[in-house]
Image (cartoon, rainbow, N blue to C red):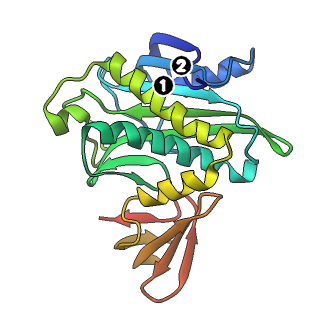
Amino acid sequence: MTIGIKIISEEQLTSTNTYAIKLLTVEKPPEGTIIRAGYQLAGRGQPGTSWESEKDKNLLFSIILYPDMIRPDQQFIVSMALSLGIHDFVSRYVPHSAIKWPNDIYVKDDKIAGILIESSTMGEKIHYLVAGIGININQEKFVSHAPNPVSLKQITGKEFDLNKCFGELAQDLDNRYSFLKYDKTEEIKKEYHKNLYRFGKLSGFSGPEGAFTGIIKKVDDDGRLIILKGSGEIGHYYFKEVEFVL
């Protein structure tokens, strides 16, 4: 087991990612070390966003990884693997879950989990990668301006044991990360696309060129979303360059 080999638990942190990155400046924790918090004072989502979480209601943690088997320009494969791990966990309890590019987990059209990845490279190697994960488990009311959050409890009506969920999720993440260690990257790519939100379906988008319709054809190794537009053109988009119009 790699992910979960060491667990640092805190009742409250500013951000588990911030804690992990500061820790890396003074020591090199074992790969797979998890920093878990019951509450984050300034939980972070993707750049420009925050992550809302009620105290002791959800799972909030960061994983320290050293994926030196992956080139820096191909590190999106790590995001794919971790997204699949979370998808495996969510799918155990609810149907109709999918990975919304680049690495959010959706149940139908609502967001149940997200990943924030921060990394440091040295030459041709990834020095470290920190993956911050937030997954909504028992929260029943969301008060932020996030448009579509949802939790397992809201969907199922059941209360979940957070520690049990944490153990299961860590195992699912470890299982998917092991695919990379054993050079099964093509399997990860295949599974990622199989479970990609609105993959192969005509959808509405908004990009630099304005609103358009198109079909997702694939996600490149560098994380770019490839869309066949209704006009027949092929669009290549990095994160934040295009959004779904639901």
- Which residue matches tag 1? 61
Q: What element carries label 1?
A: strand
The residue at 58%/25% (across/down) is 18
Of 95 and 14, the residue lying toward us = 95
Numbered disc total: 2
Of 229 and 176, the residue lying toward us = 176
Q: Is mark 2 on a helix, strand or loop?
A: strand
Of 119 and 189, the residue lying toward us = 189
Identify which amino acid the numbered label 2 is placed on.
Answer: Ile
Relative to 34, residue 231 above or below? below
Identify which amino acid the numbered label 1 is placed on.
Answer: Phe
**Quadrant of image for the N terminus:** top right
Of 21 and 73, the residue lying toward us = 73
Q: Position of residue 215 (x, y in %)?
A: 42, 75
Q: Describe residue 222's horizontal placement relative to residue 57 as left or right.
A: right
Q: Residue 28: name its quadrant.
A: top right
> Is label 1 in contact with label 2 (beta carbons under 8 Å)?
yes
